Amino acid sequence: MKTKRFLSILLSTSLVMGLGTPGLVLAEENATLDVIFYTNSLTKDVGEIEYINNMAEEANVTLEIEQISSGWDEIKSTLLASGDIPDLIIGKDAIVSSDVAQFKGLFADMSGMIDEYAPNIRKAFDEHPELEYLATSEDGAIYGIPKYQRFWPKTYIRQMINKEWLDNLGLEVPETFDELYNVLVAFKEQDANGNGDPNDEIPMDFAAGVASHSVYQMPWILCLLCGYGLPVTAITDDGWYLDDGEVKNIYMSDEYYDLLQFLSKCWNEGLINPEIFTQDYATYAATSRNGVVGYTLGWDITDRMGSGEVAEQYEVIGTILPSEEYADKAVWETSYYTLNYAYPTAVMSAACENKEAAMRFLNLFYDDTYGIQVLFGSMGECIQDDGDGTYTVLPPGDETMDPGTWKWTNALADMGCMYISDDIELELPSDMQTIASLDEVYTEELERVGDDMWPGAFLKYDDAANSELSFYMTDLQNLFETSFADWLTGGGVDEEGWNAYKENAMNAGYEEARTIVQTAVDDYFTYMGK
Amino acid sequence: MEFLSCRFQGGELRKMAFLKKTGKNIQKHYQLYLMVLPGLLIIMIFNYIPMYGIQIAFREYSFSTGLTGGEWVGLKYLERFFGSYQFWSLIKNTLMISLTTILFSFPVPIVLSIVFNKIRSKRQQKAMQTIVYLPHFISVVVLVSIMTLILSPNSGVLGQIAAKLGYNGVIMGDSKMFVPLYVISEIWQHAGWNSIIYIAALSSIDNALYESAYLDGANTWQIIRYIDLPSLVPTMMILLILTMGSVLGVGFEKVYLMQNSLNLPVSEIISTYVYKIGLQSNQYSYSAAISLFNNVINFFFVFVMNQIAKKSTGNSIW
């Protein structure tokens, strides 16, 4: 007992003394930091990445690096359970927000230190207040640093059509549902690819349900709802969207009812690949790479059709309208926030002895020039400084690598903690340019989304609300998913069935769930001053 | 009063006699008790002690406060489950899948083992056995992928045959086909493996029985009917009781892997629901409550089955 008491007095005095020591004095001293970098398996030894060394030097720290690119989940659980974590853990998805909630005492609250030691992060939070909202937990503390990647596109899903088939049959790119229907019928009945067999074309193919996505996402074909002006987001499956700030659900909308009639008509005519609900993503990808699909949806042409000859036949097409009168209402799918923001991408141990030094180091990830290097690689090797404040991402130094592999090898890339300032002018590598150019098709439609862009990445729920919401959503998603499949393949839905379905959804807690989400959205908008 | 105290004393005496007897018993057979001890310890440590975690089913579990820290909410989560929109369909689907599986897959290993037992050549018997139980080692993920591929209407062998025969649609996505597919693949994969225990039981039958049966002029059917089957009954009963214990606990992986939007109305079972709500939505208290309910029902089934077996055949676990 005596020794214990003695120890605790010793500890608390040293703690008080530690607090009393002015940070500036320490800042001059070189500090050693234990850091875990969670990286992609392609990434080379982090200690050999030039910009990491430059950052360490600038922050006046010595890094003891441990790099982990596989088996992280096992390592993580023992690491967190032991309570002995390194000074910093850096990497997207290395520590997730539920870890932060579960092991609250393990991570340092950086809210006070950011103002003092991390001017870049402060500046970024001021420029993008949603970053601070994302990072701040309910109790007002900041346990992790988010990332802002900026360059990822606004849209997650694009629709593509086989232009060569259209040309072969003398058809125009469809702009309305009726035209789309006619095109699909032509693809089915005629020999669109000109190989002499009129039956080897699949007019329409898309991913629907868990089997094909392997994660929960809504059936991609529901992006057609954008034609009605519903700004959907395809990266999740809960179906929420904003209508002038009011939370609504696509699965409960009249537009959805309308679209189902159209899709069910397509299904009955055999225009849709019968395997949409059962094929896995690998099969979905393989089918389209054979060049047998007419109209499909996905990330981009390279992803869906590969980079060979088949890809050249396809073209990304703009929003298809239910009818002409929707021309000034149409929008397009956007998952911008989910694609560009992540939290947390760096956390600090509460037991870190040199919090100031660690903060100084983290601060550099938010530096203008280091930010882009985190994403694309070191200056000189991967990025060229054009001198006038603009930068160019260089083509791969190794000719055997594509730009993506080159980036993953030489940088923390998407796995890193970073902030890409909106002021930086950077010329992108070719693969990113194609992505950006794919957004161009939808420029006008995306502008119409405006403030109704779904802020899913920023929504925060307290424990009770979260528990309620997931309870309702598990039942609702079951209802939505089965009804969609049932109606699509079973000849559509009539008024009576639709009303019964809506009543079921109400019984399963739709209104309660909507209210919870609305509150979270309102909280976010209030914070952002909208 | 005197009578009562007498009885009390009598009880006391009997208790002491029992303790004495047990003590002697342990002393006499201590080697056997020592052999049981490690098993008992393992069951204590890994099955009984963790049961204190059941309380999270009655608490508002949160990460930061730990197992015992959450606020006590009593039966809230059980009530929520009973009141759930999906409750009855979950129970119905689970029972449908598990009872059909038991009904159809239980007799197959018995038949297989008797057939194997009749094969004369030892080498052929071994080879056949190995062939039949090899599928057991295929992982469920691979098995379901194989099913999806061969049943695909565009590229699968069986899928195309079915299409030629006039079947219109996707077999894996047909809600009427879900249970048959599940059961058939289950039999194909596990019947061989499950027959091992019966083969062992058959090999322990005294050869003298067979010989005297031959001498009396019994044919193969009669030998099966009057020697093989009766000697398998105890094994069958114990296995049946044990299977009944998992009536509501249908294997999660396979159903989950076979699930798609089309068959969801028949393929959403308790364990997949628990997975969705418990692990994907982090509702640990709720999923603990459902699992607890599940186990209580399973225990009930074991109990009832055991009583039935005891009454009808005299074979039982306790």
Image (cartoon, grey):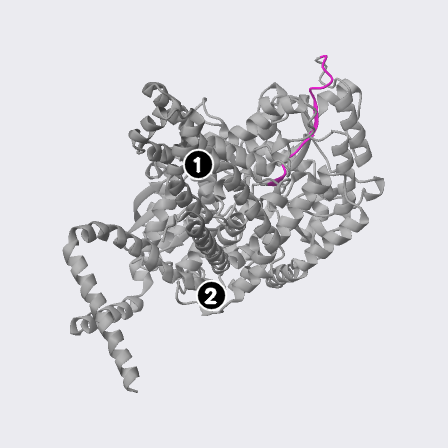
Residues flagged by tags 2 and 1 on a common chain: no
Q: Pointer 1: what residue?
A: A377
A14, B109: nearer the viewer: B109
Secondary structure under badge 2? helix
Residue under pointer 2: B58
In the image, the segment drawn in magenta is: A196-209
What chain does badge 1 belong to? A
Q: Is residue A33 above or below residue B123?
A: below
Q: Is residue B79 left or right of residue B13?
A: right
Label count reads 2
Q: Quadrant of the N terminus of chain B?
A: bottom left
Taking the magenta stretch, the answer to whether it contains residue A201 is yes
Identity, as a three-letter code, of the amino acid under mark 1:
Gly
Quarter of the rendering containing residue A370: top left
Q: Residue furthest right?
A: A325
Residue A252 in the image: state x and y as whole percent.
Answer: 72, 52
